Image: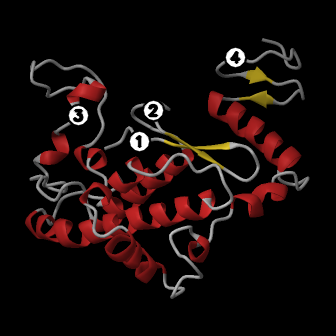
Amino acid sequence: MAKGGGQVDAAGSSGGDGVEDATAKHMFDRIGQQVHDEIVKNDEAKKYIKELEGKLSLASIWNELASTADTCELVKEYYTKRLGGNSNRYPCGTRKEEVNRFSDKQQAEYDNKKMKCSNGSNGKDEGACASFRRLHLCNKNMENMDTNNNYSKAKHDLLLDVCMAAYYEGDSIKTHYTPHQVTYSDSASQLCTVLARSFADIGDIVRGRDLYGGNIGGLQIGTPCGKQLHVTTTTS
C-alpha cells in the first residue's frame, strides 16, 4: 500500500498524517499519542480530576468527619463498627470456603461456568481461562454496595469500599500465600507477582474492565459530573 493513502491495515499502514506504521502496535501507539496530545496536553482531562477525586474522611458512613486520617484504621472501623461485621460485606467471602488460592495445584483450575475453560468437568479443552487466584479475589464487599447513590458522596463511598477490598486482599496474601511460598520456593508465582496481579485486578474492577469476562454485569454508581462510574461484579 502506498504511503499517505490514509487507510489503515494491521501492519505497514499509514494514517491520515502520512506516518507509516510498521506494526499494529505502532498504529495504536501513534493514535494513543495523538489522543494524549489533544486531550491531556490541552488540559481537557484536568477539568474532571477533582470531580472524581474521593476522600475517605468524607464518606457517608461517618456522621461527622472521620475519627482518623489513617486508611487502614478507617477501613477496619468501617467494617467492624459501621457495618457490624456483616458477613455479606466481608470482602473475602463467607469465611467457610476451602480455597487454597496460591497453591500450584489450584493455579491450574478455572471457573468453567463463566469462562468454559479447559480442565472442566467434561474433560475437554475449551479455550482461554481465568486464573484460580483471580476468581477468588477479596472484592465481595463491592458486589454488595448500595447502587442507589447518585449523590455527592458516591465517589467517597466507592473509594472506601475499594480500600476495604485492597486491605483484605493484602491481608489474605500475607496470611495465605506464605505457606505456599515456602512449599514452592522455586515457583514463578512469587509474592511480588501475586501482589501486582491482585491489585491490578481490583483496579480493573473499579474501571469497569474485565480482562477475562468483558464488561458484563456490574454496578452503576453516579458521579457528580453526571457520568456513570461502572464497577464490574463479574470476578467473584
How far separated are the C-alphas under marks 3 and 1?
15 Å
Instruction: Compare marks 3 and 4 and give the one earlier in the sequence.
Output: 4
Disc 1 crowd, CA 10 A, few/some/many (<14, 14-19, 20+)? many
Foreground tag (4 vs 2) = 2
Disc 2 crowd, CA 10 A, few/some/many (<14, 14-19, 20+)? few
Label 2 belongs to which residue? 217
Query: Which color scheme did the rendering employ for the protein?
Result: secondary structure
Instruction: Compare marks 4 and 2 and give the one earlier in the sequence.
Output: 4
Residue 9 has which mark?
4
| Cβ atoms at labels 3 and 4 below 8 Å apart | no
Instruction: Compare marks 2 and 3 and give the one earlier in the sequence.
Output: 3
Q: Nearer the viewer, residue 175 or 9?
A: 175
Answer above or below: position of 23 versus 62: above
Disc 3 marks a residue whose amino acid type is Asp
Point out the image quarter for the C terminus. Answer: top left
Disc 4 marks a residue whose amino acid type is Asp
Q: Secondary structure at mark 4?
A: loop
Label 1 belongs to which residue? 233
Check the image and name the residue furthest to the top. 1
Foreground tag (1 vs 4) = 1
Q: Secondary structure at mark 3?
A: loop
Residue 81, given in percent of the width and then of the height, sits at 35, 76
Foreground tag (2 vs 3) = 2
Q: Residue at x 83, y 13 (%)?
A: 2
How far separated are the C-alphas under marks 1 and 4?
36 Å
| Cβ atoms at labels 1 and 2 below 8 Å apart | yes
How far separated are the C-alphas under marks 2 and 3?
17 Å
How far separated are the C-alphas under marks 4 and 2?
33 Å
Residue 111 has which mark?
3
